[in-house]
Image (cartoon, rainbow, N blue to C red):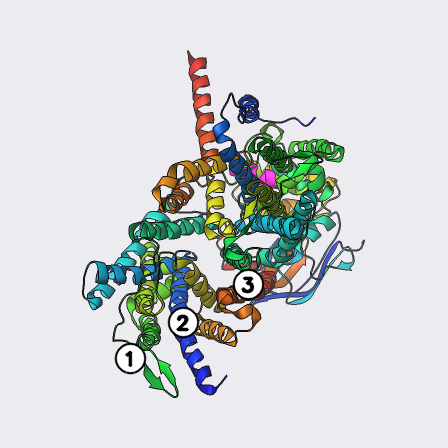
């Protein structure tokens, strides 16, 4: 058991009187695919927002690779290696697919205003690298042929893949996928599952929030269950499926 | 070099435009428009900055004329009252304006859209009042300002100043286009597309907004300095609220996220206001209002960009027509 | 400065501040229901004043009729602005909406400037010009009209929003537009109403104030800005804060001019409001940043 790549210790988040996340402790093992599940409103996306720095914790600490994150803003955490995708995709509609992924290379490139303005050699060299790597990530998700298409012209399933390619381009250590399977058909979900396994082979730790049980059960090596902001169970997929508390939490839910 | 996915007709159009620009002030071409074109060039410089600011980072500046003014006034004050070399004064004005924009940029850009717009409006008005009260010559302004010169070569005729202004203008346009096509440009477009996603990819959104604000302020300041060394006169009226609104009109017509569109925007607006509407009293303000409303309602990407789109559509349809026959 | 003088300045500050308060209310109402900052708010005030002058003096209408008609026209302009410019813009971005309302503002200003000219005008006083003595200071009867109107308007709005169906519907829209839609409240109608209400408020403010302070085609800009300052004190959410903010701004301006100390001579009077604005915005930006981080 190596040191967890991500740890939350007693993390809570309250919006005025509403407690969205309630003293959650979790430890994410590096290199493992971990899933966070739970009925709607359980606080899963809020937890993501806390980890990525969009929200500040009301209570508790978050540690990444052993160091506390405190109040780092999201862009700094991205540079550190914590990157996420969004439930509603959030692609850059004013760019092509390729340009979207190239933007993902932002934290791994460095030339700035001056080099760009004057087209100094450093800028061309880095641009070439950025293009090559972006193409690589586009190919990894299977969208190479759509490089020059406007990002929003792609169907939803491919938009989600594009968002993942974009996140991969940041060369993250921890990738948080927020409901990557939502809105996908069965075939697309299988491709997504394969992609996530390939991401794992790239030594990237994957943490995903998902509603689709078969997808989760087939992928996740560790599952954490949230309900109403608190962690109610965790274990392997098989263990969690049989947990009484988990079943009770979902009984009120409509399953698809 | 970097490959560009740019349609071929743009190269031709650019060549034509450049040729026209170079030939214009000559006696055998269209010298009567030299002064108008100088003003168009100056306006373009300011408008490009505004386009970058509004079109890419989605921040509205209703006080951009204020930076034009600081460039003008600092240059005027330093050269006339303190006897500085005009080039040095221009540099100092740009540095000062940039520093000022930087200082107010950080707090201002934490504000969201509406507050930001009001803040820039307020700022523009404060500077206007300061120009009126503290500027050399007060509300009536002051004249007798030096011209720019390099050694013994003075920019003392409109002909020479035309090339000076357009030289600066083209450099600024090229620099801006370079920025747009770079990693920085992508970051800016990302911010415009989705701030949350941009931030999640390691882009420091606030910092970029401030940087663009400072850049736009520097462009405006340089234009202001050139303005003052052309007109050889400075007065606060040129930098009031309506002046800022006029700049927004130019940006809106040119296309908020378009660099070269700024020439189009500045050109049409100036032509309108200086040649056509001058005969009609206050109607220019009415037209500006109408233009702002109509363009933002019907073509929110700006007139020029919309026209480009129409043009491209036509070309595609013509080509398809040819293929079918 | 003697107590009498102080009181005099206080009164003049309250009078001026009443207008800022009314304008601030207009901003708050539109923002609450539509989340739009109406940069043309000041123009409605200008219309109130200009129109009542034009109708009374140039067209010879009796003053009360002119005032009422000018308020009606201002409201109509507000309605038109919403219907033609705002509603047709549908899902416009914040940037677009700001530019659209600015466009409307200068359009209105330009039309008035063209139609009437650039001269200052002053409509007649409502009830004569004999100042009334009050605790050693003099209040102009028109000033009583101004302050009184503001107080009445504030009370009326409070009653309207708390006790009438329409008012409550407006408030519901402000708090949660989706839920409001679900219980059958027509969001577009509410938005239209908010514009009409804000325009009417502006018109009332303008009509009642113009006799005291003169007005001209370009009065809208600074007035709008100061009303914005008043409204931002309450974060555009609280009507009471907007009113109090307006009064406070008026008093601060008045006292600063009274002190006549260096930078605060009357030429800089407007700058005071602007500095207050920037300070408030700075403060808010700090709060906003905190709010966003802590949700």
Quick check: do tags 3 and 1 share a chain?
A: yes
- Report the magenta stretch's main SS: helix
> Residue A237: where, in percent of width, then height?
65, 51
Mark earlier in primary sequence (3, 2) = 2
Pick the residue in front: C71 or C269: C269
Q: Chain of mark 3?
A: C
- Secondary structure beneath dot 2 equals helix
Dot 3 corresponds to which residue? Answer: C278
Instruction: Find out whether residue B241 is within the magenta segment.
Output: no
Q: Which residues are magenta?
A: A156-165
Q: Chain of mark 2?
A: C
Dot 2 corresponds to which residue? Answer: C16
> Residue B89: where, in percent of width, then height?
67, 47
Dot 1 corresponds to which residue? Answer: C130
Disc sitting over residue C195 in the figure: none
Residue at left offset 34%, top offset 60%: C120
Which mark is in front, 3 or 1? Answer: 1
Mark earlier in primary sequence (1, 2) = 2
Taking B214 as reference, is B237 left or right?
A: left
Evaluate whether residue A211 shows in this view: no
- Secondary structure beneath dot 1 equals loop
**Crowd tier of the residue under label 1, counting other residues whose Cα lies within 10 Å: few below 14, some 14–19, many 20 or above:** few
Quick check: do tags 1 and 2 share a chain?
A: yes
Evaluate whether residue B129 shows in this view: yes
């Amino acid at each position: 058991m190596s040191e967890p790549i991500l740890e939350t210790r007693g993390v809570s988040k309250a919006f005025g009187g509403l407690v969205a996340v309630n003293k959650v402790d979790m430890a994410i093992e590096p290199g493992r695919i971990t899933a966070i599940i739970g009925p709607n409103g359980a606080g899963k996306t809020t937890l993501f927002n806390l980890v990525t720095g969009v929200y500040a914790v009301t209570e508790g600490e978050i540690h990444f690779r052993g160091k506390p994150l405190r109040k780092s803003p999201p862009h700094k955490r991205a540079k550190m290696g914590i990157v996420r995708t969004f439930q509603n995709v959030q692609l850059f509609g004013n760019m092509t697919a390729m340009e979207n992924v190239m933007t993902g290379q932002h934290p791994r490139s460095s030339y700035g205003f001056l080099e760009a303005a004057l087209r100094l050699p450093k800028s061309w060299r880095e641009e070439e690298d950025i293009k090559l790597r972006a193409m690589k990530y586009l190919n990894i998700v299977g969208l190479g042929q759509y490089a020059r298409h406007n990002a929003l012209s792609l169907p939803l399933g491919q938009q989600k893949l594009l968002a993942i390619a974009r996140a991969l381009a940041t060369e993250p250590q921890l990738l948080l996928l927020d409901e990557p399977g939502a809105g996908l058909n069965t075939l697309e979900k299988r491709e997504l599952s394969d992609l996530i396994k390939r991401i794992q082979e790239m030594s990237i730790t994957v943490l995903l929030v998902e509603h689709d049980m078969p997808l989760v059960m087939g992928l996740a090596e560790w599952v954490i269950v949230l309900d109403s902001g608190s962690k109610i169970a965790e274990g392997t997929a098989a263990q969690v499926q049989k947990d009484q508390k988990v079943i009770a939490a979902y009984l009120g839910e409509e399953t698809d | 070099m970097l490959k560009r996915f740019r349609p071929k007709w743009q190269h031709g159009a650019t060549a034509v435009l450049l040729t026209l620009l170079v030939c214009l002030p000559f006696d055998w071409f269209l010298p009567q428009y030299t002064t108008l074109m100088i003003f168009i060039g100056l306006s373009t410089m300011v408008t490009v900055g505004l386009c970058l600011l509004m079109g890419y980072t989605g921040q509205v500046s209703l006080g951009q004329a204020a930076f034009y003014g600081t460039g003008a006034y600092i240059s005027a004050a330093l050269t006339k009252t303190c006897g500085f070399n005009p080039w040095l004064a221009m540099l100092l004005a740009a540095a000062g304006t940039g520093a000022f924009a930087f200082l107010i940029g950080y707090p201002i850009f934490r504000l969201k859209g509406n507050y930001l717009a009001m803040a820039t409006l307020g700022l523009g008005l404060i500077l206007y009042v300061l120009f009126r009260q503290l500027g050399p010559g007060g509300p009536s302004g002051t004249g007798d300002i030096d011209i720019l010169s390099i050694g013994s070569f003075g920019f003392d005729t409109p002909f020479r100043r035309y090339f000076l202004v357009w030289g600066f203008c083209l450099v600024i346009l090229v620099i801006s286009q370079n920025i747009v096509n770079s990693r920085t440009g992508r970051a800016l477009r990302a911010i415009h597309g989705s701030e949350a996603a941009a931030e999640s990819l390691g882009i420091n959104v606030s910092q970029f907004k401030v940087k663009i604000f400072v850049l736009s302020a520097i462009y405006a300041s340089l234009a202001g300095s050139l303005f003052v060394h052309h007109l050889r006169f400075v007065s606060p009226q040129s930098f009031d609220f309506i002046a800022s609104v006029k700049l927004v009109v130019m940006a809106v017509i040119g296309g908020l996220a378009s660099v070269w569109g700024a020439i189009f925007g500045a050109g049409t607006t100036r032509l309108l206001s200086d040649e056509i509407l001058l005969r009609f009293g206050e109607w220019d303000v009415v037209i500006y209002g109408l233009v702002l409303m109509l363009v933002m309602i019907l073509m929110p990407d700006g007139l020029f960009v919309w026209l480009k789109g129409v043009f491209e559509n036509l070309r595609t349809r013509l080509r398809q027509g040819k293929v079918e026959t | 400065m003697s107590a009498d003088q102080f009181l005099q300045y206080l009164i003049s500050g309250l009078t001026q501040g009443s207008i800022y308060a009314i304008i601030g209310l207009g901003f708050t109402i539109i923002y609450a229901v539509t989340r739009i900052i109406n940069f043309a708010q000041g123009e409605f005030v200008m219309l109130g004043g200009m129109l009542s002058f034009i109708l009374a003096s140039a067209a010879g209408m009796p003053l009360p009729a002119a005032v009422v008609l000018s308020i009606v026209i201002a409201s109509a302009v507000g309605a038109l602005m919403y219907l033609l410019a705002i509603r047709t813009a549908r899902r416009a971005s914040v940037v677009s909406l700001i530019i659209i309302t600015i466009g409307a503002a200068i359009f209105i200003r330009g039309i008035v400037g063209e139609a009437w000219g650039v001269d200052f005008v002053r409509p007649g006083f409502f009830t004569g010009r004999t100042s009334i003595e009050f605790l050693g200071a003099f209040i102009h009867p028109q000033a009583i009209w101004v302050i009184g109107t503001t107080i009445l308007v504030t009370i009326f709005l409070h009653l309207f929003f708390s006790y009438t169906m329409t008012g409550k519907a407006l408030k519901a829209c402000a708090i949660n537009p989706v839920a409001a839609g679900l219980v059958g409240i027509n969001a577009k109608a509410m938005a239209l109403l908010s514009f009409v209400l804000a325009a009417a408020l502006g018109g009332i403010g303008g009509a009642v104030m113009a006799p005291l302070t003169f007005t001209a085609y370009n009065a809208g800009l600074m007035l709008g800005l100061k009303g914005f300052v008043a409204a931002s004190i309450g974060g555009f959410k609280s009507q009471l804060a907007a009113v109090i903010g307006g009064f406070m701004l008026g008093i601060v301006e008045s006292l600063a001019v009274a002190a006549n100390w260096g930078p605060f001579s009357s030429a800089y009077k407007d700058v005071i409001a602007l500095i207050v604005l920037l300070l408030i915005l700075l403060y808010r930006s700090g709060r906003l940043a905190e709010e966003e981080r802590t949700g």
